[in-house]
Every structure is written in structure tokens, then in C-alpha cells.
């Protein structure tokens, strides 16, 4: 009898001891900041960095983390490559909009996504495993014409310099559409750079009846008459390991439903 009681006590203790391990992104990124805001609401929660959405999903599947922040299009790409992961990962809420930005050289070979469907075009798509790189992979799944372009797994300011010089024809970035962001400032301050449009309707994929990408017109330059660019947007979302304790998952869902402003950095 004592042995049975002890077993039950230990099982209950293990259940109560489960806490959040949140896999995010780099320390400089917004996912890391959001992860800490989530963690602040749960005793014992911890936040870990990652190389991007792919590593985050790998950690959920392996049980190395039970919460991940990642792009919704990255989830669709990941589960297309690993169908068994669909039963191990649950999407429990969206955080904020993230958009795809195509940066090109003014008067260069690329003006829009149609030009990316030509032989001989080069595009930097972000580091391997990054959100931008996964977005590009998913875009090529939906529109095979993009496979004609030569993709380069590099990102950051260095690729913008190479686009400006003509070394690369374009560069792809995925981020929140904030005019005070580094990408918008860099393009605005460089006479050789501009944003290209993305409008291919083949990117109109859906998940559970809702579009993975929405087609938007995003302001990319400050001022009353600042330029806008047509592009596609997805969302930064919160995913969990499907085996997470139900009560803990319910608390997390409540936080996402009721405190979006706080999680985004507002008061």
C-alpha cells in the first residue's frame, strides 16, 4: 500500500513539476524577447535560443522543448518534409504579422517575383534554417518557377551590400513591417536599393481553411507619401508539443488569447 501511495505521489509531483521550455531564436531577435515575456508568467519557465524555426520544431518533436515560437509558413514546410511531426506539434495561437521583403538593385535584373522565375538570377535567402530560408523553400514548393533562381544561404547587411554592388540580384527577408526596423532604414539610406513586389497567386496556400500568406500592401518608407510595396505576409505563432500537460497548455492558451499587447511588448 505504501509503495502504491509513494508511486502516486511521485507521479503527481512530476506532473506539477513540468514547466515551460521555450525555444525561440537569436538573443537579438523578437522571438527571444517574446519568449521571455511568456516565461515571466510561468514559474520555472526557461527560454533557450535557436538557429531558427527548423531547430525549434526539431526540439518540439524530440521533447527538448515544449513551446516554440516560429513562422506559420515554416510549420507548413516542416510538416511537408516530416509528415509524422503533424501529430506531435500543435498550433495554439498567433502573435503578430511578419512579411516577406524582397530587396533588389535599382534598375537591376529583378523588379518583382516574376523575375525570380528566370535562369541566371541570384537571390540571398538567409542563413540555413533561418525563417527567411525556410520561407523561400516553401515558396518554391508552391511556385516551382522560383527553382530557376540560384539561392544563396546568406543574410544580413553583407548581402544588401552585394545586392547594391550587383554581386547578387536580390535578397529575401522575413520580419515585422516596422518602419523603424534596420532593413527599412538601410534601403531608404541607399540609392542603389529598393523593394521589389511579390504577388504570385500560386502562393495562396491554406491551413485549416485560413491562408498561410495574405497579400498585402506594406508601407516601406516614412512620410505621408512614403512608398508602399505589394508582398505576402504570414504570422509569428506559438506551437507546443502535443503531449504537454493539458492544464499548462490551457494556461498558455489563455495568455495568448487575453494578453496579446503584453506579449508584443506593449503595456
Image (spheres, grey):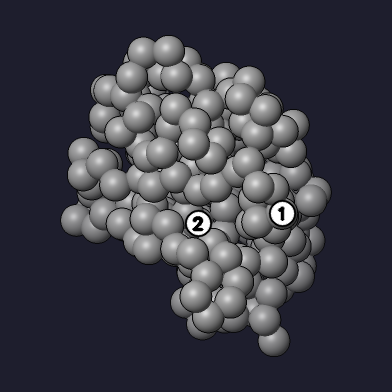
The one nearer the camera, 219 or 226, is 226
- Dot 1: within a 10 Å radius of its alpha carbon, few (fewer than 14), some, or many (20 or more) residues? few
Q: Is residue 46 above or below residue 223?
A: above
Rendered residue at 35%/36% (across/down): 113
- Is 239 on the left or on the right of 111, as rendered? right
Rendered residue at 65%/34% (across/down): 164
- Is 253 on the left or on the right of 156, as rendered? left
Residue 159: in sight, yes or no? no
Name the residue at the top extreme. Answer: 120
Kindly identify which numbered label has been placed on residue 98: 2
Mark 1–mark 2 Cα distance, whole angstroms, equals: 22 Å
Residue 71 percent location from the top left of the image:
49, 48
Q: Which residue is mark 1?
A: 189
Q: Is residue 119 above or below residue 135?
A: above
- Dot 2: within a 10 Å radius of its alpha carbon, few (fewer than 14), some, or many (20 or more) residues? many
Name the residue at the bottom extreme. Answer: 267
Q: Quadrant of residue 267?
A: bottom right
Camera-nearest label, 1 or 2: 1
Residue 58 percent location from the top left of the image:
56, 31
Amino acid at each position: 500500500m505504501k509503495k502504491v501511495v509513494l508511486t502516486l505521489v511521485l507521479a503527481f509531483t512530476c506532473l506539477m513539476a513540468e514547466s515551460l521550455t521555450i525555444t525561440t531564436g537569436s538573443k537579438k531577435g523578437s522571438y527571444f524577447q517574446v519568449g521571455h515575456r511568456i516565461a515571466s508568467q510561468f514559474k520555472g519557465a526557461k527560454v533557450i535560443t535557436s538557429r531558427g524555426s527548423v531547430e525549434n520544431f526539431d526540439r518540439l518533436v524530440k521533447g527538448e522543448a515544449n513551446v516554440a515560437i516560429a513562422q506559420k509558413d515554416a510549420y507548413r514546410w516542416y510538416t511537408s518534409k516530416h509528415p509524422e511531426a503533424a501529430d506531435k506539434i500543435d498550433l495554439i495561437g498567433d502573435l503578430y504579422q511578419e512579411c516577406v521583403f524582397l530587396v533588389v538593385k535599382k534598375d537591376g535584373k529583378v523588379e518583382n517575383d516574376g523575375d525570380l522565375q528566370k535562369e541566371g538570377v541570384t537571390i540571398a535567402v538567409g542563413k540555413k534554417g533561418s525563417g527567411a530560408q525556410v520561407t523561400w523553400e516553401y515558396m518554391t514548393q508552391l511556385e516551382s518557377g522560383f527553382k530557376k533562381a540560384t539561392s544563396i544561404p546568406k543574410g544580413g547587411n553583407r548581402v544588401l551590400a552585394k545586392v547594391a554592388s550587383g554581386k547578387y540580384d536580390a535578397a529575401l527577408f522575413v520580419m515585422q513591417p516596422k518602419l523603424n526596423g534596420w532593413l527599412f532604414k538601410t534601403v531608404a539610406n541607399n540609392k542603389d536599393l529598393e523593394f521589389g513586389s511579390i504577388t504570385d497567386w500560386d502562393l495562396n496556400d491554406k491551413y485549416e481553411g485560413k491562408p498561410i500568406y495574405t497579400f498585402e500592401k506594406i508601407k516601406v518608407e516614412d512620410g505621408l507619401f512614403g512608398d508602399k510595396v505589394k508582398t505576402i505576409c504570414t504570422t509569428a505563432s506559438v506551437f507546443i508539443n502535443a503531449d504537454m500537460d493539458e492544464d499548462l497548455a490551457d494556461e498558455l492558451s489563455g495568455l495568448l488569447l487575453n494578453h496579446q499587447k503584453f506579449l508584443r511588448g506593449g503595456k
